[in-house]
Image: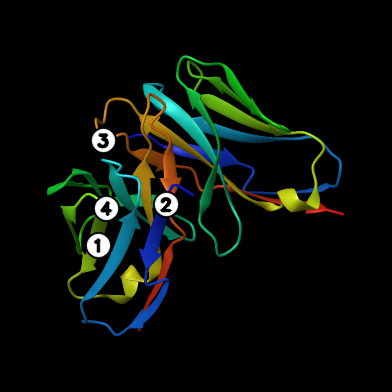
Amino acid sequence: KQEVTQIPAALSVPEGENLVLNCSFTDSAIYNLQWFRQDPGKGLTSLLLIQSSQREQTSGRLNASLDKSSGRSTLYIAASQPGDSATYLCAVNDSGAGSYQLTFGKGTKLSVIP
Amino acid sequence: DAGITQSPRHKVTETGTPVTLRCHQTENHRYMYWYRQDPGHGLRLIHYSYGVKDTDKGEVSDGYSVSRSKTEDFLLTLESATSSQTSVYFCAIRGTGVSYEQYFGPGTRLTVT
């Protein structure tokens, strides 16, 4: 059974700092990996998706990398802003399931202090 | 936002009553999913659908049933609600194309008293 772990569970940084969020997964047979953002009381917003054949994806100040063989992904946020404060979720799409189900980590709650 | 709506957005119900949550999408996506989100557990898959009348169980399906009679609607039913089903419920769709990116609805907060 796939297990996804996100460390740390919470992170507080001063505005302007670059930061890295970590995600690890136990079964490397994945189809892709998605990073989401969730604001309090809101739904999930997809940030980046990395296919299993890719090493990284970039969108604005966000860069996600994938090392499938070691079961790790990182989300890099450059020049953090207070508006980046949210919970960030990592989810893997198991290629063998046929249903393209997502298995989620429990998230990292990010606070960017002005 | 992939045209996903959920109704109701908030509901309080009593133990033992039936409850149905609705997910509606406007873009004709084949795959739809129901997840629940609980503190300490993250999001877990309840059921999913891969077409009209085609559904299957997820990780936490006990106590839930689903139906999909039209492409655009995916219903989640709690036949007899229990306090352990107090949660936030999210519907999602799988996008088209090779990426199979999933997009989520705004969620339904259900409280069972």
Which SS class for mark 3?
Answer: loop
Relative horizontal placement of residue B29, taking residue A37 as reference (left or right):
left
Residue labelled with disc 4:
B72
Between marks 3 and 2, how big is the CA–CA gap? 21 Å
Which SS class for mark 4?
Answer: loop
Tell me the subunit letter for badge 1.
Answer: B
Between marks 3 and 1, how big is the CA–CA gap? 18 Å
Q: Are marks 2 and 4 in contact (CB under 8 Å)?
A: no
Which SS class for mark 2?
Answer: loop
Which SS class for mark 1?
Answer: strand
Residue B3 — which label?
A: 2
The residue depicted at 79 percent of the width and 42 percent of the height is A80
Q: Are marks 1 and 4 in contact (CB under 8 Å)?
A: no
Amino acid type assigned to the residue bearing label 1 in the image: Leu
- Image location of residue B30, percent across then percent down: 26, 40
Between marks 1 and 4, how big is the CA–CA gap? 14 Å
Tell me the subunit letter for badge 3.
Answer: A
Q: Nearer the viewer, mark 3 or mark 4?
A: 4
Residue labelled with disc 3:
A99
Sequence-wise first label, 2 or 4: 2
Q: Are marks 2 and 1 on the same chain?
A: yes
